[in-house]
Amino acid sequence: MCQLFIGADESLWESQTRSIRIDGVVTSVRLELFYWNTLAEIAHRDALPLNKMITSLYFESLESNHDISNFTSFLRVCCSRYLSLIADGALLRNDDSLQALDATTILEAENHRRRERLARYPNE
């Protein structure tokens, strides 16, 4: 099992710091290349520059009253959820806009799958 993970391209876990301007303030975000690549894929789907997509996530999170004190962790979870939705077949890995999707239906199905997994694999 471990070879599947440790045999991957080492550059994927190298960290990169990028400067992003959010609401006129420049901030630095440090993520592994794997996450930068995934964020770029997400941004591409909605034809947005990466910085604009990240800024949109930031403001939408604030509007939803999320605690984004650790914004970098939030971005990692966004990437992981995106890839999980693809793995579960809820999303296709193509160029269709994410904004055009029915988020409510996708989230309900995701919650159903999560409940099924928890029933099958309860925490020990």
Image: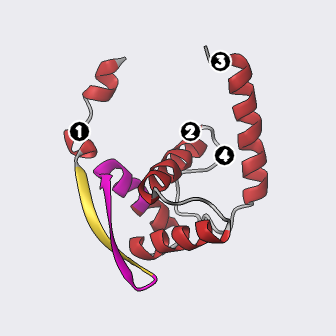
For the residue carrying disc 1, how many other residues have a C-alpha within 10 Å: few (<14), some (14-19), or many (20+)? few
Badge 1 amino acid: Asp
Q: Position of residue 1 (x, y in %)?
A: 37, 17
The residue that appears at 23% across and 38% down in the rendered structure is: 9
Badge 2 amino acid: Ala
- Left or right of 97: which side holds 107? right
- The residue beneath circle 4 is 90
Badge 3 amino acid: Tyr
| Disc 1 to disc 3, C-alpha distance | 30 Å
- The residue beneath circle 2 is 87
Q: Quadrant of residue 62?
A: bottom right
- The residue beneath circle 3 is 121
The answer to whether residue 47 is above or below residue 45 is below
Of the image marks 1 and 2, the number of the one nearer the N terminus: 1
| Disc 3 to disc 2, C-alpha distance | 18 Å
Of all residues shown, which one is farthest toward the bottom?
A: 24
Asked which colour scheme the image uses, the reply is secondary structure
For the residue carrying disc 4, how many other residues have a C-alpha within 10 Å: few (<14), some (14-19), or many (20+)? some
- The residue beneath circle 1 is 9
The residue that appears at 74% across and 26% down in the rendered structure is: 116
Q: Nearer the viewer, residue 91 or 72?
A: 72
The answer to whether residue 23 is above or below residue 95 is below
Badge 4 amino acid: Ala
Q: Nearer the viewer, mark 1 or mark 3?
A: 3
The span picked out in magenta is 23-39
